[in-house]
């Protein structure tokens, strides 16, 4: 994770529940470049 746009090698989408009952989605996976675990939140605006 060096600040460039990186893509997860094996992405998985997860659904998270937030306080107040709202749901948000996130992507988890390992960086295809360096193998660092990634966790990217996909909250809707
Ligand atoms: Zn990386």
Image: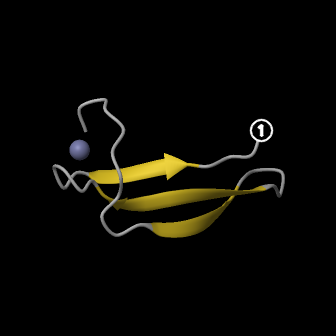
Q: Quadrant of residue 16?
A: bottom right
Extreme residue in the left direction? 34
Q: Is residue 1 above or below residue 9?
A: above
Residue 40 position within the rendered picture, expressed as x and y whole percent measured from the top left: 48, 48
State the residue at coordinates (81%, 55%): 22
Residue 28 position within the rendered picture, expressed as x and y whole percent measured from the top left: 43, 60
State the residue at coordinates (19%, 50%): 33
Mark 1 residue's CB less than 8 Å from ligand 1: no
Image quadrant where one finds the C terminus: top right
Extreme residue in the top direction? 3
Residue 4 position within the rendered picture, expressed as x and y whole percent measured from the top left: 31, 32
The residue nearer to you, when weighing 23 against 3, is: 3
| Left or right of residue 22: residue 31 | left
The residue nearer to you, when weighing 38 against 7, is: 7
State the residue at coordinates (35%, 58%): 8
Secondary element under disc 1, as helix, strand or loop, is loop
Query: How many neighbours does mark 1 have within 10 angstroms: few (below 14), some (14-19), or many (20 or more)?
Result: few
Residue that badge 1 annotates: 45
| Left or right of residue 25: residue 13 | left
The residue nearer to you, when weighing 19 against 41, is: 41
Question: Where's ligand 1: which quadrant?
Answer: top left
| Left or right of residue 17: residue 42 | left
Q: Is residue 15 above or below residue 21?
A: below
Q: Quadrant of residue 32?
A: bottom left
Residue 1 position within the rendered picture, expressed as x and y whole percent measured from the top left: 25, 39
Report the colour scheme. secondary structure
């Amino acid at each position: 994770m060096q600040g460039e746009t990186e893509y997860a090698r094996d992405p998985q989408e997860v659904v998270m529940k937030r306080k107040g009952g709202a749901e948000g989605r996130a992507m988890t996976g390992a960086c295809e470049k360096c193998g660092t675990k990634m966790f990217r939140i996909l909250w809707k605006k």
